[in-house]
Image (tube, grey):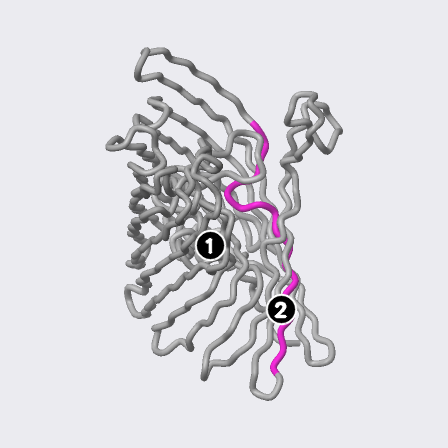
Amino acid sequence: MKKSQLAQSIAIALLAGAAAGSAQAVSFSQNDVNVDINGTVNGFFVNRQEDWTNNATGAKASTSNSGISNGLLPGWINFVATTTVDGTDVKAHISFAPGINNNSSVVGLPIGNNANGAGITNPYSQIDTRNLYLQFGNKDWGTIKVGRDIGLFAQEVIFSDMTLIGVGGTTNASIPYNTTFGMIGHGYMYTGFQAQATYTTPNKDGLEGSVGLFQPAKFSGNETKTPGLQAKASYDWKGSAPGKAWVGYVSQSTNCNASAAAFAAVGACNGVGYRANGEEAGIKATFDKLGLVGYTFRGKGLGLSTIGAQFLGGANASGALLDSSGYFLQGTYQATAKTKLGLNYGRNEDKDGWLTNNGKKITNNSYTIGVYHAFNKFLNLVGEFNTEDVKNVADSNVNLKTRSVSLGAVVFF
């Protein structure tokens, strides 16, 4: 039996470096095809305090809640089939990612009613098909991937975020919810799982590149004739201080054949469309027990980075583009063979474009203190404290401060 390969979704958590344990998998072979089944389940108790201030009137409000929820990762089950035929490696990956929560207030009911009796139901607990792709290639000429998988832009930074197997921030994902946001929205934007056709070069002495065509989003119009473009180049090295450096790019144009007024509510185009662009750069390295990560990005028309969603609110009805930028810093320390301590900080900033008060900003600052303990090779215990400060003087003129404490466990198998 061939040694099992870790599915990419599980590798994400391991690459985050937050746990000392290793994932296991069930693997078997039949007719020259190797099939791996692996997954993860997590759950956290989260206590959350939110303080709200209206800058114009001085009015204040405070709310607090708690819940049992997933962290930044949902549950995940992966089915990965691999084989090699005539020198070509072939792979198929299917995964399902359910959450543990729903929005029902009645014990035992699987689905709640978001409309408070209006008859429209939408459960928070849902099954998300995150991976559904085929891949083929070899180490000589590279690989081609077609299907749904994680995006290229902002991929490496979420791999490196220690809160990937924790909770991180909760401002944009109130309790209960399927997943929290980690440091998405404060330090970087969410890469997402997207339909794509991507080529990745062979790895040559640590140097590797990927470029792909992506399913275009109707982010400011109603025509999607031009696919999105994403690209990433990285270099990893070994030695006494192993690490990785990378750069990335995302671009998509949109077309609109309707009036600006028809799309003004979502900050859309003025009938002629526009192009959204984003650039990123990052580096991480390990010095004995100390791990460091640094990252920065900027976007033009890319969307509200303080929410973290690409292409949402990238321009206003006149076509003026939103400016976004951010940076992320993280340090971790391997205190014992099984316990890692971590501190990270991130900041995103949006201005102009879709925002109703041009020249002013929305800023989102956040930091997380975390403890990550590998109880055994399957089970990781996690404790985090997170604080977020959102200063929204450009849109709602409201300041929002959120503090959360989370304790939970993550199983990889």
Give the residue type that dot 1 points to.
Answer: Ala
Residue 316 lies in what quarter of the image? Answer: top left
Tell which tag, 1 or 2, sits nearer the viewer: 2
In magenta, the rendered stretch is 67-84
Confirm whether the magenta stretch covers residue 77: yes
- Say which mark, if any, is on residue 267: none
Q: Is residue 248 visible?
A: yes
Q: Is residue 371 visible?
A: no
Q: Secondary structure at mark 2?
A: strand
Camera-side residue of 237 and 201: 201
Q: Quadrant of the N terminus?
A: bottom right
Q: Can you identify the residue that label 1 sits on?
A: 20
Determine the CA span between mark 1 and mark 2. Answer: 28 Å
Residue found 72% across the figure and 23% down from its top? 106
Q: Is residue 136 left or right of residue 161?
A: right
Q: Can you identify the residue that label 2 sits on?
A: 92
Taking the view exactly as shown, the residue that stands out farthest to the bottom is: 86
Residue found 40% across the figure and 26% down from its top? 402
Sequence-earlier tag: 1 or 2: 1
Q: Is residue 285 left or right of residue 221?
A: left
Residue 180 versus residue 29 in the image, above or below: above
Q: Position of residue 90 (x, y in %)?
A: 60, 76
Residue 178 versus residue 379 in the image, above or below: above
Confirm whether the magenta stretch covers residue 385: no
Q: Position of residue 137 (x, y in %)?
A: 52, 79
Give the residue type that dot 2 points to.
Answer: Ala
Camera-side residue of 100 and 117: 117
Taking the view exactly as shown, the residue that stands out farthest to the right is: 108
Q: Position of residue 12 (x, y in %)?
A: 48, 56
Camera-side residue of 17 and 338: 17
Camera-side residue of 159 and 321: 321
Neighbourhood count class around disc 1 (C-alpha, 10 Å): few under 14, some 14–19, many 20 upward: many
